[in-house]
Image (cartoon, helix red, strand yellow):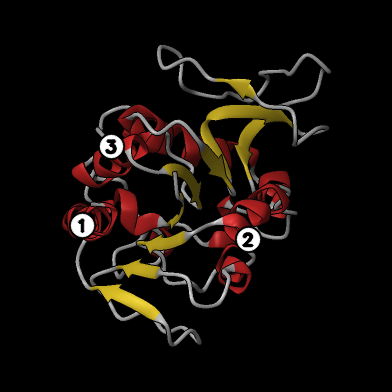
Amino acid sequence: MKKLVILTGAGMSAESGISTFRDSNGLWNNYPVEQVATPEGFAANPQLVLDFYNHRRRELLTVQPNDGHKGLAALEKFFDVHIITQNVDNLHERAGSSHVIHLHGELMKSCSVKNKYKAFEISPEQPDIHLGDLAPDGSQLRPFIVWFGEAVPKIEEAIPYVEASDIFVVIGTSLNVYPAAGLLHYVRNKQPIYLIDPNEVNTYRKDIIFIKKGASEGVKILSEKLLSCQL
């Protein structure tokens, strides 16, 4: 079975109704990144940060995986698929994908301010984190999210999968956010690289096959291309 590794970004989940950050009406226009996505912002106003992620968590509970998510899960019948995502939603898992690495954390998990690396599941029935909610170590619970200025430990787990891949795919990311964008450096020369995005994506790689479509339509086209090569 060929190894298919897929890097996904915000455009992967946009069709499901998940708010993105960097588009013209993105979340950063309403919430400055310094206030809601940095350790300093949490220290200055933890209630604002908790409310921001509580709202996003409740939003996530109202949406469903789109055909793009489902299409990637279906490819597991034919390929050894590993998904590396910059997204903090759980739509890949809910669509049926078995192997997902979350570079930037997971919205439906929490951690303590003393230990950012030990995660606790958040119940969909009680999705909010409140001030005063404590972890087992006695410290305040916070979202299990990698904020700006924090390390991205999962990148070390992701790199070997990219290095070993036979086919590499990028979906719905501008390739402007590091270290995720740097994964492209670990793709071997002369192996297929596909990039699915309706917008122009600038990259130094000249060997990329572009599919200028949204996630759902793009994954459908990708699947047809990959399966035709398999037959």
Measured in 3D between alpha carbons, the distance from the residue under mark 2 to the one under mark 1, in whole angstroms, is 24 Å
- Residue 92 lies left or right of residue 145; in this view the side is left
Q: What residue type is labelled 1?
A: Ser
Q: Residue 58 location, x and y as percent? A: 36, 29
The label shown at residue 163 is 2
Residue at position x 26%, y 29% in the image: 62
Q: Residue 120 location, x and y as percent? A: 64, 21
Per the image, the residue denoted by label 3 is 74
Inspect this view and state whether residue 55 appears.
Answer: no
Q: Residue 146 location, x and y as percent? A: 64, 48
Q: Is residue 45 above or below residue 200?
A: above
Inspect this view and state whether residue 100 appears.
Answer: yes
Quadrant of the rendered image containing residue 169? bottom left
**Callout in the foreground (2, 1):** 1
Q: Is residue 110 above or below residue 34?
A: above
Q: Is residue 118 above or below residue 207?
A: above
Q: Earlier in the sequence, mark 2 or mark 1?
A: 2
- Label 2 neighbour load within 10 Å: few <14, some 14-19, many 20+: some
Check the picture and name the quadrant holding the N terminus. Answer: top left
Q: What residue type is labelled 3?
A: Ala
**Callout in the foreground (1, 3):** 1
Per the image, the residue denoted by label 1 is 228
- Residue 57 lies left or right of residue 114; in this view the side is left
Residue at position x 18%, y 59% in the image: 221
